[in-house]
Amino acid sequence: MVIARRIWSLGLILGILALAVAATSEAAQFNWQQFKGTQIRVLLNKHPWQAGIEPSLKEFEALTGIKVVLEVYPEDQFRAKTLVELTSGASSMDVFMTMPGQEGLKYMRAGWYQPVDEYLKDASLTAPDYNWADFLDKARDAMVIDGKTIGPPIQIENSALMYRKDVFQKYNVKVPTTLDELEAAAKALNGKPMTDDGQPGFGFVARGKRAAATSQFAGMLFAMNGTWLTPNREPAINSPEAVKAIDMWGRLLRLYGPPGSENNHWYEASSIFSQGKAAIWLDANSLFPVIEDPQKSKIIGKVGYAVFPKGPNNHPGGTVAPWGLGIPKTSKNQKAAWLFLQWATNKEQVLKLQSGAGVLGARDSVWKDPKGRGKVPADLAESLAQGSKVGTPLWNPPVVAVAEVRDAIGNAIVTSIQGGDVKAAADKAAADMKRIMAETEGK
Amino acid sequence: MTERGASGQEQVWAAPAGSGGRFSHFIERHPVLIFTTPAVVVVFVLMVFPVFYTLYMSLHSWFASSLTKPEFVGLANFKRAFTQDERFRNALWLTLYFTTLATALQVFLGVALALLLNRPFRGKGFFRSIFLLPMVATPVAIALVWMMMYNPTLGVMNYLVGLIRLGPFKWASDTHLVIPALAMVDTWEWTPLITLITLAGLASLPLEPYESALIDGATPAQMFWRITLPLLRPTIMVALLFRAIDCLKTFDIIYVMTAGGPGFASETLNVYTFQVGLFYFHIGYACSLLMILFALVLGVSLVLIKTRRGSW
Amino acid sequence: MRTSRRSGEGPWTYILLTLILIPFLFPLAWMFLSSMKSQVQNTAFPPVWIFKPTLNNYREVFIKNPFFTFTLNSMVVAAGSTGLALILGLPAAYAVARFKQTGIALAILSARMAPGIAYLIPWFILFTKLKMIDTYTALILTHLIVALPLVLWVMIGFFEDVPGELIEAARIDGCSNFSAFFRVALPLVKPGIVATSILSFIFSWNNFLFSLIIAGFKTRTLPIAVYNFLSYEEINWGGLTAAATIITLPVLVLSLFIQKHIVRGLTFGAVKG
């Protein structure tokens, strides 16, 4: 009927009006310029992400009217400086790069993070298209500590298998998918000529330097179905599975790896690998720019990237480790800082960083975007997606005193590399862990 | 020896001409006060606060946090270090091992070189300037270059020793070789200092004992052992203790080269304290370790000052 | 002094000298050579001895790092702490020498004994509360902890060598204490002052630990710059050695020209008599 049609069209118009009002009012509620005139102090670790985002900072300043004072330090110095600032209680930092798996629990319990859950829920502080759900599950979960979200993830990496495709082909060795195959391959290729001038190389290279090794070793521990702590938080590093993992890591390096592995951080390991002197490298796949840089590597285009080998019973291995951004509780510009956190991790920036600088971002939509892969090799992208689904987020023991526990466990790894009594070393590591945890978490 | 001025106390001389006024009169009567107070005040302010803070914190237990306060524990930290902390005892031992090895090497080499070089030759100045270079080069930079050279797989050290059919060694990556390897770097850096000090000492030795010894028919060896060495002893002692103090406190090169590794094989007290404080967040315990190191250095320094005073 | 002066100027002497110099020069030469190699050449084994040198690393160092800022900062801090150390330390050294104030000498020298780390957190807290982090003032003050005892240690020896009679004579002529110090003693110890200034400058220039924590972004000094080359991705050996060469070059050149004074300064602190 005519009246019905009129009511219908009125309803339609009203509906559209309502939507329009809602849309504009939502946009009007969130305003990039709401903290115009403030200044924020951002501390970043020297890192591909930092190198990628720096040129875009001017955009942020133009968008928000917030001035960014940026400070960049290499990792060790960055940690020392951040720690001193946070401990003093008098820091003027507003944003800092953080690795929840490394310091998250400690910093949270020390009252140093400002949680951002409230900001995420607040429509006036969070852009409507920010889409928190777009971040990869495990990356997002890793940024939640003691039930509170500390910030967005900016990069994700796996402990992964990197190998010389050409060497494997030449000697007709199958690319390992399990740990047993890994050992067989390392043994078969050890000592075979593999450099570009026909010199022999090592079958296997990886970190062995005490604490630094534990983050990569975690992948193997997990594959063996071992873990750091039992469900009631007792050390499990001397369980039969864990001992097998420690034994294997040390054995691989001792028999098929370079001498002095117990002092190798990723710097040394990557040098040896990119010089063509090793067939297999187990480490963080975010380090791929080193291997693919024509200025620095002799093996460009010859490297394959695969998921961390599986353990017995096809148990998956590998780790998932994100870097993120956080806001110190002492910051006087927390909300302005939150705008920075958002902007730096919105879809546009992540796409730019991933396709341009090769940063392994943490947004699902960007990985699915054909433009999003950029220079990242196809098999790396694939293995990253796969590895991030099956890998363990516990690339460090989930304790408060991470650094101290890592050193205790790392010591057992060093003993294993040197051919010592692994069970005894693991028992000692467990005892140390128990003591450290009692001291630092009992209160 | 030079003559001393008036004994420690100020004596009022005849009223100085010129500037009058109560203030300049005050300066006149208390030169020691005026001359030394600024320096003492600055040192006091800059140093006392940290030292007292460290002392205060060493008696507390504090796992760095903005939520929990430091807790007074008396001497528990010290007790723990000496009786329960294996890593501390390891660090103490390594500190003494490194210091003794490095100092002994430097002094031995330095004195030997000085004796060899104690002859006239042209271009002494030029030689000395080159010889100085290891001492003035930036330690952090040099340590990294040495790391490069020590790399077991890619470093030039293994190449060089390979030329004389030795090695390859793991150098700073070897549990047993790491302290000697580090001591070698320190020796490389500071032997020139010992040599220069000894040369200066040799240059100021009196001639008479040698002349009378020659008349008595002494051999060069006898002159060396009976005259040169004993006369040089104060000089050498001072250089030795000076370097010993610095070796006890060595941080830069060890931290940059091995961070205390492999395992804990090169973790001296200084490096261990840095870990405990800045990476493990045990601020109170770290402070007690610092006090122990301070006491160690103080002990050696007192010996140094007493020796120096002896020759005043 | 050795009286047996055989002809020390024979060729053997120079051969000996060269042999002695080689191990001491080698790491520095290696540093310089590496700075002109590419990363691939730098990580090659056996080491590359003959190669086409490149200035790429130096270019990279200057482009990627505000090296002029670093250098300026290092200079300001070194000059500032040296100057301040002289102003405070020279009178003090004079007083210690002339009036035998060993107690005060000990008090100031003890500053040299505490391990550097002990100063870090308390200083950081202090300077943060005074809002002085990342200022030249803070850095200069912290470097004083090294410079002032050094000035004292060396200058006490020099002042002791000033003949007491000269001072007495001046005093009898009616000189005030200050004039005696300023007009009589000071000119006589000029070589010592030169020596100490240079040493203090060099040690401040090389200081790493304090700058690490107290310096901020605006006041970063050169040793920190070297550390910058240890980044998340790799150790850039070429860049690192280029930076290291740039940092050590000024002090090397300085000491080449003024070695006589440096030697006097260093040895005077040790040798008496």
Image (cartoon, coloured by chain):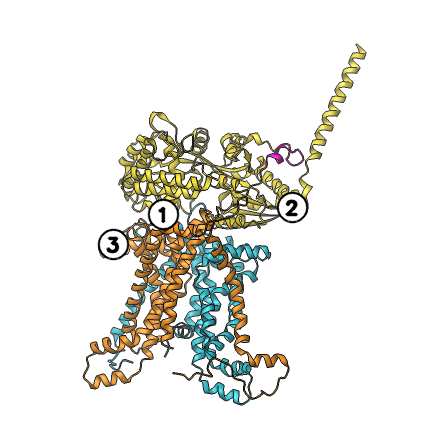
Question: Are tags 3 and 1 found on a single chain?
Answer: yes
What whole-number distance in Å separates the C-alpha atoms at marks 3 and 2? 60 Å
Quadrant assignment for the C terminus of chain C: bottom left
Q: Which secondary structure lies at badge 2?
A: loop
State whether residue C156 is above or below residue A13.
Answer: below
Left or right? Give the position of A427 relative to C75: left
Instruction: Work out whether residue A314 can be spotted.
Output: yes
Residue drawn 28% across the image and 37% down it: A189
Pick out the residue farthest to the top. A1
Q: What's the magenta bit mostly, secondary-structure-wise?
A: loop
Q: What stretch is highlighted in magenta?
A: A116-129
Give the percent coordinates (x, y) of residue C233. 44, 45
Give the percent coordinates (x, y) of residue B288. 43, 54
Q: Nearer the viewer, mark 3 or mark 2?
A: 2
A127 in the magenta segment: yes
Chain assigned yellow: A
Q: What residue type is labelled 1?
A: Gln
| Residue, disc 2 | A66
Q: Which secondary structure lies at badge 3?
A: helix
Q: Which secondary structure lies at badge 1?
A: loop
Q: Between residue A198 and residue B247, name the one nearer to us.
A: B247
| Residue, disc 1 | B84
Q: Between residue A114 and residue B308, name the one nearer to us.
A: B308
State whether residue A343 is above or below residue B286.
Answer: above
Chain letter of the residue carrying label 1: B
Q: Which amino acid does label 3 sit on?
A: Gly
What whole-number distance in Å separates the C-alpha atoms at marks 2 and 1? 52 Å
Give the percent coordinates (x, y) of residue C156. 44, 75
| Residue, disc 3 | B162
Q: Chain C is drawn in which colour?
A: cyan
Instruction: Work out whether residue B251 can be spotted.
Output: no
Left or right? Give the position of C218 relative to A221: right
